[in-house]
Amino acid sequence: MTLFGRSPRGKGHWHPDPSDPERTLRDLLDHPEIPAVILSGPAGSGKTTLTAKFLVEVMVRGGQVAVTAPTHKALRVLRESLRSSGSGATFATLHSLLGLRLSEKEDGTYDLAPGASPDLSLFDWIVVDECSLVGPELLETLERQKKRSRILFVGDPHQLPPVSAALLDTPPVFALPLPRIALTRIHRQDKDHPLHTLTRRILEWDPARGRPTLRDLLGEWEGSLGDLDLLPSSREALFRIGGKDQDILLWSRRIETQGDNLRILAYTNRQVERYNRLLFKSHYGDCPTPFAPNERVLVNETTGIRSMAGELTGVVAAGEEVTVLEIFPERHPDYPEIPAFRVYLEDDSGEEFSFLVPEDSSSHQAEVDRIFREVRRIREEKGLLAKQESAQMSRAAWKLKRAFAPLRHSYATTVFKAQGSTFDSVIVDWRDMTYFRDDRTFLRGLYVACTRPRHQLLLAGAIL
């Protein structure tokens, strides 16, 4: 990949100094010949702190900055982290900054389509956080539109590549021929901390050796691997627990008594959905509604908020967590045969809104998928009638899909969707992680999972 060109070389040229990354970034401002640079480092290495200091320096010098990330969730986390230092910056998702919108395709998938034509020349610098999630198409669009703007890519080279580049060994950004400021020291924990030890050894493991066991990774380390009789107040950082449902439930309750926020991480959507059902039933018993008041839930896809007249009044971003206020039975006027509920919600800013959700979201999604499969089958036939029929069915499928909001429980999520998030405590389903397609990707997924917790990591069903 040759995007963003190669940085010029010569006497007096700027070059990264690994011993002083803060000064290196500051000096970069005096070298306009450098069009783009990468600030890389593992989780907890101080990337956000350095980015904040860089933003302050740019704005003190009168520069204009756009701060972006590929997802709404990552942007929200970044905005909160840069609340004071980034107050004068423009915040937008990368898609929005580039004037792109998601276009619904006839076969049920999405495509990126040009919308507005933004003027990026307004910005001296564009900071792209969580750049490991940026695919090749977005990189090419950014290269075409950046004009005079300089780019600071910020990310973790050890994370999973974006879905659009899933077959690559490394996220596309890190294949660019750009100078890199590489942070290597993890500050989130002390170097002797068990989570630090585990993270370092995952990164050092050679995938040619196959998939490691827990003993392979921890070796001679003699820290506690956990015990179901150990009191949660001990705040041990690393546990190996059983992989049965009762083990997950027991530890979930213990962690909740500590007041920590917990997330269960797995690889497959099937296992995530199973854990969400299990934890929901544990909390609310045989609840007659799909969600319950006071429950924290997840908006799985960007979803429009509509008035009673059907007018679009706002948008809730994909990945946003909201709180259920009330829930009542209500049928959709166009689909009265589908049992559904009106869910009243509140976001973290205090804004209230409501969505219609189906009683059985799995059956609803299965019906949408069935219609789109039929669309694809018909499209393979030739002729005007086949084209007209497939277009009509596609419109029907999209209407059915949009009629109900993609609300999900938030007890568990996939490792991929957890990238960029941090939780107090994390339970990782080790066995489900083995479904990663190859050893290298397994190690990346394990690294992502094991770097999400601030305090406690529980490895469920881990092989010794």
Image (tube, rainbow, N blue to C red):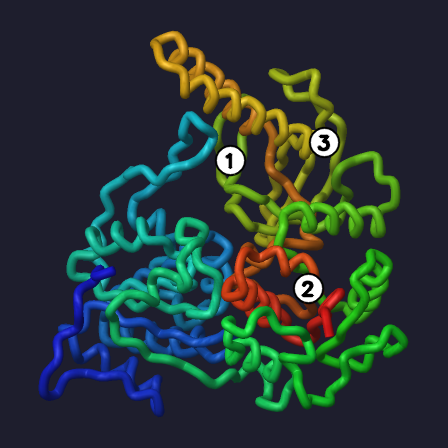
* Residue annotated with mark 3: 360
Binning the other alpha carbons within 10 Å of mark 2 as few (below 14), some (14 to 19) or many (20 upward) gives many
* Nearest-to-viewer mark from 2 and 3: 2
The secondary element bearing badge 1 is classed as: strand
Tell me: 227 left or right of 271: right
Q: From this viewpoint, which residue is outermost toward the top? A: 385
Binning the other alpha carbons within 10 Å of mark 1 as few (below 14), some (14 to 19) or many (20 upward) gives some
* Residue annotated with mark 1: 304
The answer for how far apart the CA atoms under marks 3 and 1 are is 21 Å
Residue placed at 21% from the left, 61% from the top?
Answer: 2
Label pair 3/1, CB-CB below 8 angstroms: no
- Please tell me how many numbered marks the rendered image carries: 3
Tell me: 29 left or right of 392: left
The secondary element bearing badge 2 is classed as: helix
Quarter assignment of residue 55:
bottom left
Image quarter of the C terminus: bottom right
What x and y, as percent, mark residue 215? 69, 80
Residue placed at 61% from the left, 84% from the top?
Answer: 197
What x and y, as percent, mark residue 434? 63, 60
Quarter assignment of residue 342:
top right
Q: Nearer the viewer, residue 214 or 144?
A: 214
What x and y, as percent, mark residue 105? 40, 29
Which of pointers 3 and 1 lies earlier in the amino acid sequence? Answer: 1
Tell me: 398 left or right of 458: left
The answer for how far apart the CA atoms under marks 1 and 2 are is 36 Å
* Residue annotated with mark 2: 430
Q: Is residue 67 visible?
A: no
The answer for how far apart the CA atoms under marks 2 and 3 are is 29 Å
* Amino acid on which the number 1 mark rests in the picture: Gly
Which of pointers 1 and 2 lies earlier in the amino acid sequence? Answer: 1
